[in-house]
Amino acid sequence: MNTQKVQKNQYVKTDLNLLLECLKYQMDCPLSQKEALITIYSICQQNSEASEYFREIGGLMFINDLAKSSVHCIVKEAALFTLGIIIESNVYCQQTLCTSALFEDLIFFLIKKDSGVNLKRMSVYVILVLVSNNNGQTYVRDTGCISLLLQLFRTTLSTSEKNLSDETTDPCYQLWSSVCSTLCACVNNPQNDNQNICCSVFPYAKEWLESCTKPEIVRPICSFLGLTVANNLYVQKYFVSIGGLDTLAKVLLELMHDSCSSHSSMKLAVVVTKTLDACIANNSAMGVVLAKYHTVSELLKLMSNDTLSTGEKISIILTIGHCTEVCGIQSWT
């Protein structure tokens, strides 16, 4: 078995060397370069050892340079995606590329007028895997990259695009969803000063929740809101001050009304419940806002649903606990 593993590893190393040479000698053939990049990321995906070897032979930095220097959009996109896959697969590759210089390169791709939506999405993906550690969260702030992400959060989707029949195939929606995921990584694990920066887009998130309760919009926004307010009293108070809790309570009411005939609405109501809890967990007094919406009664109805998992019911119980902590259950029901 060990002999077979050694032989397989040698084949992988040989393939990576050949693919790197192909990249270097096919500069005038973008389709060949794209195919080589596709093969490289298929080898390196979730393979830390292969990714590390590719870094050792200079492949990681070559692809990094290729993403900047190539005049072909399909090569830039494939190069960025391959970088993201390799960074995600190996911590040493992540540490090598987690620099202010790379963040500045990615900012350039995002602000360049002729950058297509897909190139922007690949750039955001690289940012996502870079900020999945402490250094990345610092660089994304210090380079101003987080401000650009917040701008994309505000502007990528228009009102009409929020009402598309199939968001999952819409390029702008996919970019916006990627931005949401990246902002979540910016503020979490560990929680940090980026929370205070990200709360600047809360009014936009609130407005969207008021105009659309589709899962494709509500889930990313709730994830972003929940992580941004988590254990941060200043951000929680700001969200309450702009009427954010009121909006979440109204969304919960609407979803509960639909949950009788829609299983997805019931599941989405649980997502909203968790976000509500994150907003009041550190100061239950703020939850008094929810009393006028009879939120606890709605949560008790939600918890009675037999299809919910134990974990989902526990999260509802915790929310009820925080809601009733200050003034008791009588004023809520």
Image: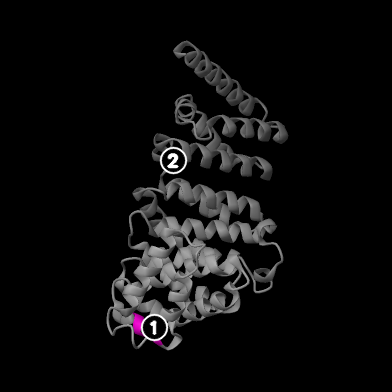
Identity of the residue furthest to the top in this view: 3
Image vertical order of residue 142 relative to residue 283, above or below? above
Residue holding disc 1:
241
Instruction: Give the side of residue 191 with respect to residue 254, left or right.
Output: left
Q: Residue 286 shows which numbered tag?
A: none
| Amino acid found under the numbered disc labelled 2 | Leu
Count of picture labels: 2
Residue holding disc 2:
97
Image vertical order of residue 287 relative to residue 126, above or below? below
Question: Foreground: 138 or 185?
Answer: 185
Closer mark to the observer between disc 2 and disc 1? 1
Q: CA distance from mark 2 to mark 1?
A: 40 Å
Magenta run includes residue 288: yes
Question: Which residue is at 32% across, 74% downward?
Answer: 322
Residue 140: where, in percent of width, then height? 42, 55
Q: Which residues are magenta?
A: 287-291
Question: Foreground: 151 or 28?
Answer: 151
Q: Which quadrant of the figure has residue 120?
A: bottom right
Label located before the other in sequence (2 or 1): 2
Q: Which quadrant of the figure has residue 191?
A: bottom left
Task: Name the image quarter holding the C terminus.
Answer: bottom left
Magenta run includes residue 125: no
| Amino acid found under the numbered disc labelled 1 | Ser
Residue 257: where, in percent of width, then height? 57, 78
Q: Secondary structure at mark 1?
A: helix
